[in-house]
Amino acid sequence: MKKRVLFSIYQTENHSNGGVNSMSQIMEQDVSVVPYIITNIHGPFNVRWEARRWIIKVTSIKWGGTSSSPFKIIKLFDLLKSNLAAYRMLKRNKIDTLYCNDIQGFWCSYYGGLLAGVKVIFNLRDTKSADELYSLKKWKYIASKADVIVVLSKEMKEFVVNKLLVGSNSDKVVVTYSIVNQEVFHPVNTVESKKLREYYEIAEEEFVVSYVAAFNAKKAQLLFIKNVVSKFRDTNNITFNFIGDFDINSNSYAADCLNEVRSLGLESLVKFVGHVVDVDKWYKMSNLVAIASNKEGLARCMIEAISCGTPVISFDVCSANEILAEYKTGEVVPMSRYDIYTQKLKNLISDRNLLKEYSNNGFKVASELFNKDTVLKRYKGAYHVNENNINSTHD
């Protein structure tokens, strides 16, 4: 018999959302589960879910806003409404497992799951940066209440055990990487790469660095432009592509990035591509993928890039050492050391043999770590952890 699971998934208007994309792939591939979904808006992923004819409840709650008292009251009311909707879905459909896909998804549904007496699985998709470790109170609360915590790498498990659970039940932490569809994300030969570059009007001799992420302060494109891209102003045959939702009218951070490029005179080096549905093609024709975020859990662009045989250069965010350094698929730079980042990037541009080594290793590692069968086996295991002790963390 298939297992019914209610997935609580928080969306933004961005199409670039690695966490929601990853969970959608799990739901699509896991034939042992019947997914039900509760989400906050009719967002970019609803069409994809509706095509599967899954039962979806949209609560229409708002999350952002100010810290004013009226807003806090509205937010509390919205969360109560969302939790009540989760409770009703769980009871009406006789569902015994609630899967909270991220922190917002937890707040939007946990108390409904608690009231319904079901198992609560929490998927942690991020970590805290070094200067945010003072604010762990809410994270510790969530970790203590969830029956099972799913994390995306061994490094993330260390963070949860050492910073959130602090020596308590570490057995409830399940490590699983995300699925990368290798029918789509795979290396291409020189001829195919050349064809892609011709189609997108990129010169064959151009060294292409791609930065794949939604535009926001966490992903830190602005600092990357100021501190890295600017150092290549006088370099020939290099292009930096920024791929991800890019609307300067609704996203002030995106507008700041565009203004910075213009003020520094970097228009010839930078291209703001925007959201693309065929991001695999951009990986395949890139020489390198850059990550300079303030923090990550396991960056989706990292695992997609190496699956395509494209090396990655990244700050030492969570999971970077585990995936890039340990498996020799790219370079890891100490956090916020833009000078070292720039120098390593210059070294990679001139060392094509090292890039080739990283490329070959990447595809091999992806085949082992991110294949469907391995990942789904671990997710299925998560549904049955602590099966006979559901109420232990609810007390």
Image (cartoon, helix red, strand yellow):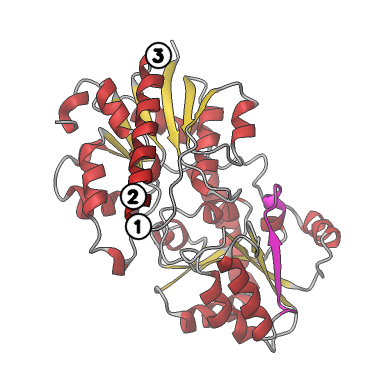
Q: Which mark is residue 92?
A: 3
Q: Say which residue appears at 50% left-offset and 37% top-offset.
A: 60
Q: Say which residue appears at 66% left-offset and 60% top-offset.
A: 247
Residue 190 occupies quadrant: bottom right
What's the CA distance linking mark 1 and mark 2?
A: 6 Å
Front residue (pair 395, 364):
395
How far across and down, in percent of the image, does residue 304 sit?
58, 51
Q: Name the residue carrying label 1.
A: 68
Q: Which mark is residue 111?
A: none
Residue 206 appears in the rendering: yes
Q: Which mark is residue 72?
A: 2
- The quadrant of the image that shows the C terminus is top left
Secondary structure beneath dot 1 equals: loop
Q: Say which residue appears at 65% left-offset and 86% top-offset.
A: 264
- Residue 278 lies in the magenta stretch: yes
Of the residues shown, which amino acid type is indicated by label 2? Lys
Which segment is the magenta one? 267-281
Residue 350 appears in the rendering: no
- Determine whether label 1 and label 2 are within 8 Å by CB: yes
Of the residues shown, which amino acid type is indicated by label 1? Ser
What's the CA distance linking mark 1 and mark 3?
A: 36 Å
- Residue 351 lies in the magenta stretch: no
Left or right: where does residue 260 sit relative to residue 174? right
How far across and down, in percent of the image, does residue 72 sit?
33, 49
How far across and down, in percent of the image, does residue 188 sit?
73, 52
Secondary structure beneath dot 2 equals: helix
Mark 1 or 3, nearer chain start: 1
Of the residues shown, which amino acid type is indicated by label 3? Arg
Residue 359 occupies quadrant: bottom right
User: Dot 1: within a 10 Å radius of its alpha carbon, few (fewer than 14), some, or many (20 or more) residues?
Assistant: few
